[in-house]
């Protein structure tokens, strides 16, 4: 992921600073999507305190590059391993049981949303769709547990 970030920064003539790299690595290494304060705490060491505002700036930069997404309902961040097309909307699938987050795109959802927004005369700056439910693994586990208790 850092290699992709370096390449994008070279293409756009922007710096991939040490803090930006550390924030990206912290998001990618986290089991659960971390918040900015979690990342600041993780990066802080004796003699070096990383301010949450600095982490937020780095996260904003990484989001602009498409390397990180913000999960608004959790105020947390996830790495983006996909290369989405310009203007392509992302659908986040959030498991309420295990907390896992997956991302996908859907031309059908984009098309329907586009028509709905056009009818309303609304032009979005960006859109993020978050769907909360149960992932396949958790659903399978709960169905198996239900049969075991019967």
Image: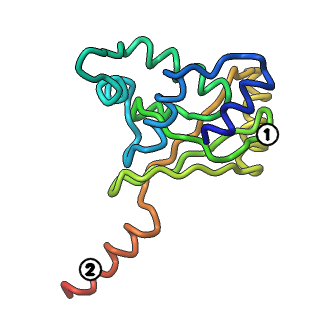
Q: Which residue lies furthest to the left in this view?
A: 149
Q: Mark 1 points at which residue?
A: 85
Give the quadrant of residue 144. Answer: bottom left
Write down the quadrant of residue 17 in the picture. Answer: top right
Q: Residue at x 34, y 57 (%)?
A: 98
Q: Quadrant of the N terminus?
A: top right
Question: Relative to residue 126, is residue 141 depicted above or below?
Answer: below
Q: Determine whether the residue tagged by mark 2 lies in a helix, strand or loop.
A: helix
- Where in the figure is residue 23, as x and y percent of width and height? 47, 28
| Residue that carries the numbered disc 2 in the rendered image | 146
SS at mark 1? loop
Q: Which residue shows up at 77% across the image and 33% down it?
A: 87
| Residue 48 in the figure: left or right of residue 54 | left
Q: Position of residue 69 (x, y in %)?
A: 56, 34
Instruction: Give the quadrant of the C terminus.
Output: bottom left
Q: How far apart are marks 2 and 1 (CA)?
A: 42 Å
Residue 87, above or below 46: below
Dot placed on the residue nearer the N-terminal end, 2 or 1: 1
Estimate the x, y position of residue 84 in percent, counting from the top left: 74, 41
Category of crowding for the residue at label 2, using alpha-carbon neighbours closer than 10 angstroms: few (below 14), some (14–19), many (at least 20): few
């Amino acid at each position: 992921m850092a290699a992709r970030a370096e390449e994008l920064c070279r293409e756009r003539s922007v710096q991939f600073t040490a803090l930006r790299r550390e924030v990206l690595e912290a998001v990618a290494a986290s089991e659960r999507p971390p918040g900015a304060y979690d990342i600041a705490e993780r990066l802080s060491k004796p003699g070096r305190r990383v301010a949450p505002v600095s982490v937020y700036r780095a996260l904003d930069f990484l989001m602009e590059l498409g390397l990180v997404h913000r999960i608004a309902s959790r105020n947390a961040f996830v790495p983006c391993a996909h290369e989405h097309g310009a203007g392509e909307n992302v659908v986040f699938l959030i498991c309420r049981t295990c907390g896992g987050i997956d991302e996908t795109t859907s031309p059908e959802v984009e098309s329907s949303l586009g028509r709905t927004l056009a009818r309303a005369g609304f032009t979005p700056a960006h859109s993020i769709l978050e769907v909360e439910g149960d992932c396949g693994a958790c659903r399978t586990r709960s169905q198996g547990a239900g049969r075991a208790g019967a």
